[in-house]
Image: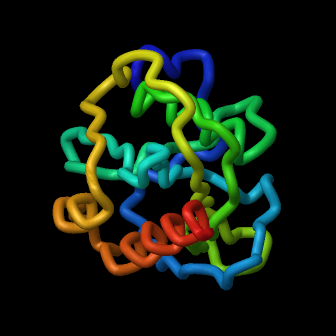
Amino acid sequence: MTCSHEGRPDKRRTPKDGRRANFRLCEPGFIPPFAQVTSVSVVAFTECGEMVATEDKRGIDLPGGHVAEGEDSCEQTARRESLEEAGVTMLELSFLRAIESDLYGSSPDELTYMVIMTGIVDMVVGEPQEGKRHVISVDEFKARHQSLRMSMLHELVDAAHTATFRS
C-alpha cells in the first residue's frame, strides 16, 4: 500500500494464503451488486481513439485498482484510479463488462467482481502517482500487455473501443 492510500484501506483485502481464483467474463449486460465489486479498471481513450495506459513494475496495463473503503460506486473508484494511476480526469464513464472471481468462494454471496468501464479522457492534470502514463494505439497496447488473461483483456479493449467510438 502506498502512502497515498493510507487511511483509505481496500474494501476487501486479497488473501495472502496462496489461494488461486478462477476468472470468468460475465455476459454483456450483467451488472454485479456494488457490495461484491472489489476492483475497477478503465479502458481510457483520447478523443482521437488512442488509449491512455499505465506502466509499472508489472508492465503496461489499464488504470485501475481496488475499491477503497467509503467509495459507493464503480464510477467513483474508476475516477480515482484514473487520476492516481494515469494523472487524468475522465468525461462520462460507461460500464463495459464484469469479470467474476471465486477467490473468496463459489457460492453466489462469495463471488466477487472486477468491473471494467470505458470513457474519454477529459484532461491530463498531472503525473501518475507511481509508474508512467502512455498514450498509445489499441494495437500497441495489445502487443505490449502481458498477463495470464491476455485474450480476455484484448476482447474487452476491442469492445470498449467499439462502444466508445460507434457512430
Residue at 59% across / 69% down in the picture?
166
Question: In this view, which residue lies farthest toward the front?
Answer: 167
Q: Which quadrant of the figure contains the N terminus?
A: top left
| Residue occupying the point 70% across, 43% down | 92
Q: Is residue 84 above or below residue 53?
A: above
Q: How many marks?
A: 0
- Residue at 82%, 61% (x, y): give it: 33
Q: Nearer the viewer, residue 100 or 41?
A: 41
In this picture the colour scheme is rainbow
Quadrant in the picture for residue 167: bottom right
Q: Residue 144: x and y, percent? A: 17, 60
| Image coordinates for residue 102, horizontal then vertical, percent | 58, 74
Residue nearest the viewer, comparing 88 with 62: 88
Is 126 drawn above or below residue 137 in the view shown? above
Q: Residue at x 62, y 23 (%)?
A: 8
Relative placement, left or right, of 69 versus 152 is right
Choose between 86 and 47: the one closer to the eye: 47
The location of residue 157, given as percent across then percent down, is 44, 67
Horizontally, residue 117 falls left or right of residue 57, namely right
* Image position of 97 with respect to 26: above or below: above
Lateral position of residue 88 relative to residue 137, left or right: right
Q: Position of residue 150 (x, y in %)?
A: 31, 73
